[in-house]
Image: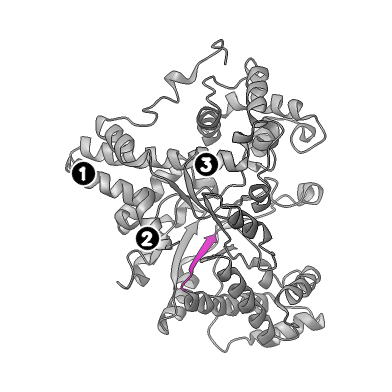
Amino acid sequence: MSKSGTNTASFIHDDFLLQSPVAKVLYHTYAKDLPILDYHCHLPPDDIATDRIFKNLTSIWLEGDHYKWRAMRTLGIDEHYITGKASDYEKFEKWAHTLPYTLRNPLYHWSHLELKRYFDVDQLLSPATARAIYDEVSNKLNQSNYSTRGLISKMNVELICTTDDPIDSLEQHATIKREGFACKILPAFRPDAAYAIENPVAYKSYLQKLSEVSGISINNYEQLLLALSKRIDYFQAAGCRLSDHGLEKIYFVKSGTVNAAHVFSKVLSGASLEAKEIESFKADILLQLGKLYHAKGWTQQFHLGALRNANSRLLSTLGPNTGFDSIGDYSQAENLSLFLNELDKTNQLTKTILYNLNPADNEVMATMIGNFNDGSIKGKIQYGSGWWFLDQKDGITKQLNALSNMSLLSCFIGMLTDSRSFLSFPRHEYFRRILCNMLGDDVVRGELPHDEKWLGKIVGDVCYYNAKEYLKF
């Protein structure tokens, strides 16, 4: 495109974030060209099955991206230009106005990486460059090699695990597999709605759908567990080997304190529930699911610590997942330890990945995994990568430091996007550069030996090979 305006050549260059010769060698020789295993994201499988072509840069970049929406609101931009009825270009124009003000926010790095890696745009986005960038990228997006599958292939993505409810048909995954797309697209089992009894009306409606897809008439707790087991079998047949749970915290109560079957019968009868009963029910069903995952050889993931839907006024207007969630300060350690131990006591603790949203819990998670790594599998219990508000440079660095100090960085299974955007795969590059720079800095300071091949092996393992071995897809 036109070279007028500020060029990113001095910004997103080959050695971006790499501050030593060692870091540069590690990244360019051992990390850069490795395939991407994105084992947790929220990409819509329907867009991949239909090989969606996005009509313009707004539709692929701003549609559903609450990271950008939050930044725009903070800058004082009216909702009309964010989720409202403004035209696509008007919305993009407001984002172009916003981006220069995001300096030091990861959006500034991510956005320019995405423009450069996918579309070869080498200019900084601003009001002055908005029209030219919008037109150039939108024209490219209308070409078949920039469809969803084209974008995935461009980033050398080998595996994507979507996030799917137990009631999902998984028809899109079957279509993708049947058509032979080179990147493996697999479902992950996310049963949060199956124990969301705090909203009885919505929960009963969900049970009806679960009954229909499982073929089990759910009239008691045993039948609920049987229905979920049937759906786990169904997901297994579709290639699923992962579950995922989004929770404020892990729930745990001592066995026999509250009867989950009794609580479930109260839900069906419409009786009101006490907070302790809700937590006890969730605690039991999580344990039962954990045992089912172990029997299948699955990996279970727990994303812990989000404070969701904090703004009730805007939640009622715009709905969930629109940018009104934040970091919560829930107590994590004790219940998490008791939960994992309950499964481990009977040797039914499957491979587990723990993610925290509150950075105050970094060392909690990094030490927790050591309690249940029993030598049976390399890195059986994992401290997951920086997630959501923590998948930026500082958050990634702190997670890697906590993991290095309290456990073994060399066993880590690396980065994921946790994203709803098809333009987010450069976040793997971002992580890889940060990792290589960290190790390079250690060598420069004399804290690690300058053993390029061994350091390169560790880099390759963390960026790709550990996850490939761990997930066994």
Colour style of the rendered protein structure = one colour
* Secondary structure of the residue carrying numbered label 1: helix
Q: Considering the whole magenta stretch, tell me its main secondary structure.
A: strand
Q: Nearer the viewer, residue 21 or 318?
A: 21
- Residues shaded magenta: 297-304
- Pointer 2: residues within 10 angstroms few (<14), some, or many (20+)? few
Q: Position of residue 293 (x, y in %)?
A: 51, 74
Lower position in the chain sequence, tag 1 or tag 3: 3
User: Where does the C terminus fall, quadrant-wise?
Assistant: bottom left
Vertical order, 437 against 38 (above or below):
above
Identify residue type, mark 3.
Ser
Identify residue type, mark 1.
Lys
Queried whether the magenta region covers residue 301, the answer comes back as yes
Say if residue 423 shows up in the picture.
Answer: no
Residue marked by disc 2: 469
- The numbered disc on residue 453 is 1
- The numbered disc on residue 153 is 3
Distance from the alpha carbon under mark 2 to that under mark 1: 20 Å
Relative to 441, 143 lies left or right: right
* Secondary structure of the residue carrying numbered label 2: helix
For residue 118, which quarter of the picture?
top right
Identify residue type, mark 2.
Glu
